[in-house]
Image (spheres, grey):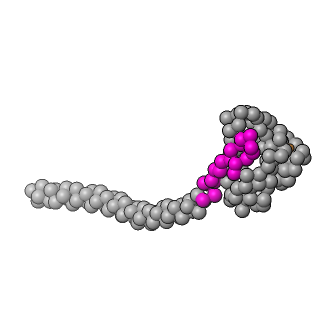
Amino acid sequence: MEFWKILPLILIVLVSGCTSQVGGNNNSQTNQTTLQPPQNTSTQPTSGSGTLQGQVVSPSEQPPALPTVHTIDITSSGFSPSTLTIKSGDMVTFTNRDTAPHWPASNNHPTHNLYPEKGGCVGSKFDACQNIAPGNKFEFTFTYVGNWCYHDHLNPSLTGCINVQ
Ligand SMILES: [Cu+2]
């Protein structure tokens, strides 16, 4: 009779033992879960500072990425304006407003080698290298600092100068 009284106690001890083991596993998982948030917290400030650094870098890169476009009209009387001051990296668009073709090109005629950037059809790359028909444009970006004069290759008496600073 005493064994039947002790058996429930034994079962309770066994069950509580299993429960304590499961609880122990839960506690260990809880400890692991508790360790992760500090890692995430330490990661968030790092990504935040990275975003701040990106914001600091991009404004310093924007000014060179925004070149100014200047327009020079070509008429039968020549280039207008005939003298223009720009900054290095700016683009100049030569627009033919005449009824006849024109051909902007770096001085000096006919070698066209005053502007130092190579790669043109004759000398300098600052050269339309063809007739610009009425209404059409010739675009060129100036990167070399200096006073670069040019002419109309079809009528060399028409001249102008671009001062690149
Ligand atoms: Cu020429």
Is residue 118 visible in the rendered image? The answer is: no
Is residue 12 visible in the rendered image? The answer is: yes
Quarter of the image where one finds residue 133: top right
Q: Residue furthest front?
A: 77
**In the image: residue 106, left or right of residue 79:** right
* 94 up-or-down from 34: above or below: above
Report the quarter where the N terminus lies.
bottom left
Residue 78 on the magenta span: yes
Residue at point 63%, 58% (across, down)? 64
Report the quarter where the C terminus lies.
bottom right
Residue 56 pos. (x, y %): 54, 64
The magenta region covers: 63-81
Q: Nearer the viewer, residue 48 or 84?
A: 84
Residue 60 pos. (x, y %): 59, 63
* 110 up-or-down from 87: above or below: above
Residue at point 66%, 48% (across, down)? 71
The picture quadrant for ligand 1 comes to: top right
Q: Residue furthest left?
A: 1
* 136 up-or-down from 68: above or below: above
Residue at point 71%, 37% (across, down)? 98
Residue 7 pos. (x, y %): 16, 56
Residue 80 pos. (x, y %): 70, 48
Quarter of the image where one finds residue 105: top right
Q: Nearer the viewer, residue 28 or 40?
A: 40
